[in-house]
Image (spheres, helix red, strand yellow):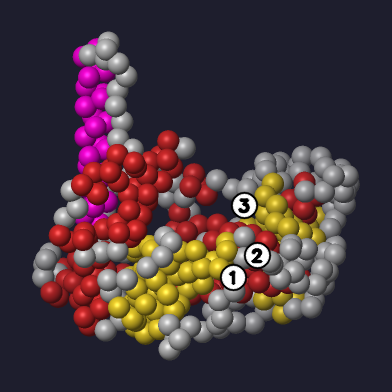
């Protein structure tokens, strides 16, 4: 099992210059390698069109070709960076192309403020006895290690977040710490009116961090649009906008961590609906609310915590979970504006989201019928509208 530890680092002015230089060199290599692959693909397409492949198959550039060329034609800037960091850039590009062939978007060129991390994949880093992070070709950087690292460190990634720097260690865990089993299962229906609705009737309201900061963010973005491109004032304003986005992102992440932790602590089996969120955000009327809700982030964090705690998270097909009656199973069509499920066949009447959550739970259990049971007490308390489970 792989677990990630993230810590804040505080480089000196000279070290920050080296870190930024490393990012710029890696970005240049990424873009030039992408350009090389793109040019080769265009040439292959042209030759194929002209039917000049009668003497053989087209040639494609892969990671090994570019790695070999990197060894032969390494620039002075690249020689100032640890060799494995440079090669990891080519591996990152290679993974992007593999993802493209698996149905994701075509790799894009990275702008000056978009390429923000580099990785030591095997060696070249260590934590000193004084608690500092030692990086090859950069030096010892102040590290705030707020918890112990369990397991064997495999990779070290340095990331810039606007004006802050972080280090992430990917750790291989030999053993996992199972927590006490409760024997309880729960179905979870995600939504916009309620962030999640549990099959026992509990609901968590969405915090809407983006909408709460909407006016302030709009003001800062308007100010950014008025600044002259390339000026120092525009760069300063860009940092202000980035900080505000970071605050919203951290609020959403913290909320998702707390909710997922409570779910994993209370339930042994947690069942979500498998949503195609990328397709759902194409609805321009709901895209902002869906993005602000962070459904996928919550599901992924719950899956990770469940794996570490010996719990189970399942994803089921959401088709007709809202329409079908959770008691008799007969389909009861209803529009989105109808918020109460009323079954004319068995007489069941309850909130439509609770009905959907029960159906989601039932889909994961063969032979299960009727309403699911779970916790009965709930305490909602947070200044941001956060709701946390209580036993």
Q: Is residue 165 magenta?
A: no
> Where 212 sits versus 367, above or below?
below
What residue span does the magenta drawing correspond to? 27-51
Q: Is residue 38 magenta?
A: yes
Q: Who's the residue at 25% across and 57% down the image?
A: 27
Q: Earlier in the sequence, mark 3 or mark 1?
A: 1
Residue at mark 2: 174
Spatial distance from mark 3 to mark 1, Cα to Cα? 51 Å
> Mark 1 Cα within 10 Å, few/some/many (few <14, many 20+)?
some
Q: Is residue 351 visible?
A: no
Residue at mark 3: 337
Residue at mark 1: 151
Task: Please report contact status of discs 1 and 2: CB closer than 8 Å, yes or no.
Answer: yes
Spatial distance from mark 3 to mark 2, Cα to Cα? 50 Å
> Where 93 sits versus 309, above or below?
above
Left or right placement of residue 311 versus residue 242 in this view: right
Q: Position of residue 106 (x, y in %)?
A: 35, 41
Residue 111 occupies quadrant: bottom left
Left or right placement of residue 183 versus residue 355 in this view: right
> Mark 2 Cα within 10 Å, few/some/many (few <14, many 20+)?
few
> Mark 3 Cα within 10 Å, few/some/many (few <14, many 20+)?
few
Left or right placement of residue 242 versus residue 283 in this view: left
Task: Please report contact status of discs 3 and 2: CB closer than 8 Å, yes or no.
Answer: no
Q: Earlier in the sequence, mark 1 or mark 2?
A: 1
Q: Who's the residue at 41% across and 65% down the image?
A: 123
């Amino acid at each position: 099992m792989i677990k990630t530890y993230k810590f804040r680092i505080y480089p000196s002015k000279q070290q920050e210059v080296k870190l930024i230089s490393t990012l710029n060199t890696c970005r240049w290599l990424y873009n030039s390698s992408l350009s090389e692959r793109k040019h080769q693909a265009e040439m292959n397409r042209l030759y194929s069109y002209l039917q000049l492949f009668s003497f053989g198959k087209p040639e494609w550039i892969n990671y090994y070709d570019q790695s070999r060329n990197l060894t032969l034609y390494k620039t002075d800037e690249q020689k100032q960076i640890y060799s494995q960091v440079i090669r990891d850039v080519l591996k990152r590009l290679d993974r992007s192309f593999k993802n493209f062939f698996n149905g994701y978007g075509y790799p894009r060129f990275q702008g000056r403020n978009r390429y923000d991390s580099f990785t030591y994949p095997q060696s070249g880093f260590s934590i000193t006895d004084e608690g500092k992070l030692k990086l090859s070709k950069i030096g010892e950087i102040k590290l705030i290690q707020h918890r112990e690292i369990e397991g064997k460190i495999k990779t070290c990634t340095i990331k810039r977040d606007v004006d802050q720097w972080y280090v992430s260690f990917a750790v291989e865990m030999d053993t996992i710490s199972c927590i006490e089993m409760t024997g309880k299962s729960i179905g979870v229906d995600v939504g916009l009116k309620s962030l999640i609705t549990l099959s026992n009737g509990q609901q968590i309201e969405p915090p809407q961090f983006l909408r709460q900061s909407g006016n302030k963010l709009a003001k800062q973005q308007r100010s950014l649009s008025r600044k002259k491109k390339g000026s120092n004032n525009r760069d300063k304003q860009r940092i202000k906008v980035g900080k505000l986005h970071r605050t919203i992102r951290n609020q959403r992440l913290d909320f998702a961590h707390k909710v997922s932790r409570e779910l994993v602590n209370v339930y042994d089996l947690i069942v979500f609906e498998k949503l195609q969120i990328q397709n759902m955000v194409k609805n321009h009327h709901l895209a902002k609310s869906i993005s602000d809700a962070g459904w996928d982030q919550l599901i992924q964090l719950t899956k990770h915590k469940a794996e570490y705690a010996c719990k189970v998270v399942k994803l089921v097909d959401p088709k007709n979970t809202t329409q079908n009656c959770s008691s008799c199973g007969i389909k009861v069509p209803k529009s989105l504006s109808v918020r109460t499920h009323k079954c004319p066949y068995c007489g069941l009447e309850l909130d439509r989201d609770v009905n959907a959550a029960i159906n989601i739970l039932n889909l994961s259990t063969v032979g299960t019928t009727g309403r699911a049971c779970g916790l009965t007490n709930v305490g909602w308390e947070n200044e941001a509208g956060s709701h946390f489970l209580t036993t």
